[in-house]
Amino acid sequence: MINFEALGLKGDLLKGIQDLGFETPTPIQEQSIPVLLTGTKDFIGLAQTGTGKTAAFGLPLLSLIDFESRTTQVLILAPTRELCMQIGKDLENFARHIEGFRIVAVYGGASIVNQIRDVKKGPQIITATPGRLLDMIERRAVDISKIRIIVLDEADEMLNMGFQEDIDSILSNTPAEKNTWLFSATMPSEVRRIAQKYMTDPFELTVGKKNAGAENIEHIYYVVSARDRYLALKRIVDFNPDIFGIVFCRTKIESQNIAEQLIKDGYNADALHGDLSQQQRDKVMGRFRARSLQMLIATDVAARGIDVSDITHIINYELPDEIENYTHRSGRTARAGKSGISISIINIKEVYKIRQLEKQLNKKFSLSRVPDGFDVCEKQLFHLIERVHTVEVNEKAIESYLPKIYDELKDLTREEVIKRFASLEFNRFLDYYRNAPDINVDQSKRDHGRNEVNRSGSRMFISLGAVDGFDNSKMLRYICETADIEGTSIGRIDIKGVYSFIDVEKSVADKVMESFKGEVYNSRPVRVDFSTGAGGGGGSRSRGDGPPRKKYDDRKPYGSDRRRSYQSQGSDSRSGGMRRTEEKKDRHRY
């Protein structure tokens, strides 16, 4: 079996690799390192997350750098501050025996004054998020005019986050004769275009299949009513007592609300999203890495760059809008060749999205049933028994307490002691799940989705849609902030061209109606009303003239309709003026 020395790595760099316990390279490392060590070609590397891409480009970089120079020779761009910091730490570990090595991480959410001071000390490598680096370039605080290599890591996500203009501006400040190395988990057309624009005859390497997830991930989905999504999440967690995972939500508001509900219900969870300060993010991530947190409730953007080993489960509280995001989410588990589980909680109208994912990823998703009360209680009971059987006894520490313990239990038989001990934990779950209903949806009842809204909530019409710059996540945030309600009160959202339909719990429907009286968006009144139609389009409202009775087919290829609908919206061809404005405002957070 090939080793790192056989790939051409030498000296102090090999010592650092050995200190970290690395013995054999991963496929992406084995195939890319010899090519990159030549330092003569542009390079495209495609591989799933968790396959060792950082070492694949980091080790060759460290072999090509002149460590006696104080000139910045390498620039690494990453989409988020978490990934930026992670890359910096990994390279520091690789170069621990290299004298004169200097690297600076530049990202938003931290003191720019301190970062400018560090850059002036002359690092050979700068790892940065595009927004903060562009700020420093504009302040003339950083000089990248002499770099020899630029690495675009997670290039697909940088483009998804709206950094195309920033990348163009940054690259215009770099020399034409540099080498460009692009690494990505997926290869959408946007990444292909950036490669064509900035690279010359690149060497392209694909490990695995393009746009595919890791092979050792089991994909499972549960079908429930929208109103039962949170109940399903709790049962899934209770049925997997050893879970150590990430729950993905679409919006910051939803991730915060779900985390707060889980904490209130006694679960060991916390939220991670872009509204947290860097100090808060570091605290949450520190607890998660130390496994003092069992579940991290996160948005897609906030979770990029999380490199935590042994994550057992990824739970999609709601499916993402884009297939690429599903790949990135599921890639947080099954890292470094280990196995993992990716779970999706969907409603009946989202089954077609699962079919699209199966087709695009060439993977089979298994339909499973949300465990009932008996299943959960049984699983928890035997988990407790297993813990008792495997617990390590500190004989010396407990020895002095044993006589009193034996005396307290002397009137109980062995069987009674076992039953009462097991009941301490079992009774808690038994009481909670004693009359728990079956929340699974029978897919054979194809009209369930239509009847669900009438039974559980109200379908509402709003005179805003895609032409106003809305997608599902922004509409959810807009409704929640305007009406001051929680995201869990909102069910399905159907975004159309000039209007949308929203499922709202009956308990808050009147509040939503009242909150939108007199509401104005972009200088025009917003109309909100109840809809008697049950589908995604064509339903007439109970009063007012409403949209025309036209049937809309919302079952386009998964994620394609939203992207296309924004292409005519202002200067940002990706996602419309509203999204681009928000990203420009918030880009320095990441």
Image (cartoon, rainbow, N blue to C red):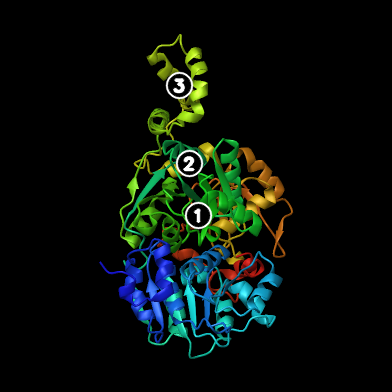
Name the residue type under label 1: Gly
Crowdedness of circle 2 by 10 Å Cα count: few (<14), some, many (20+)? Answer: many
Distance of mark 2 from mark 3, alpha carbons? 28 Å
Residue 315: image location, x then y, percent: 45, 48
**Among the two numbered marks 1 and 2 on one chain, the one whose residue lies closer to the N terminus:** 2
Nearer mark to the viewer, of 3 and 1: 3
**Residue at the (64%, 78%) spot, across then down:** 121
The answer to whether residue 249 is left or right of residue 23 is right
The residue positioned 70% from the left and 80% from the top of the image is 139
| Mark 3–mark 1 CB contact (< 8 Å) | no
**Residue 562 percent location from the top left of the image:** 50, 64
Q: Which amino acid does the dot numbered 2 rest on?
A: Leu
Closer to the camera: disc 2 or disc 3?
Answer: 3
Q: Quadrant of residue 276?
A: bottom right
Q: Secondary structure at mark 3?
A: helix
Circle 3 residue: 421
Q: Quadrant of the N terminus?
A: bottom left
Q: Is residue 416 left or right of residue 283?
A: left
Numbered circle sitting on residue 233: 2
Mark carried by residue 537? 1
SS for tag 1?
loop
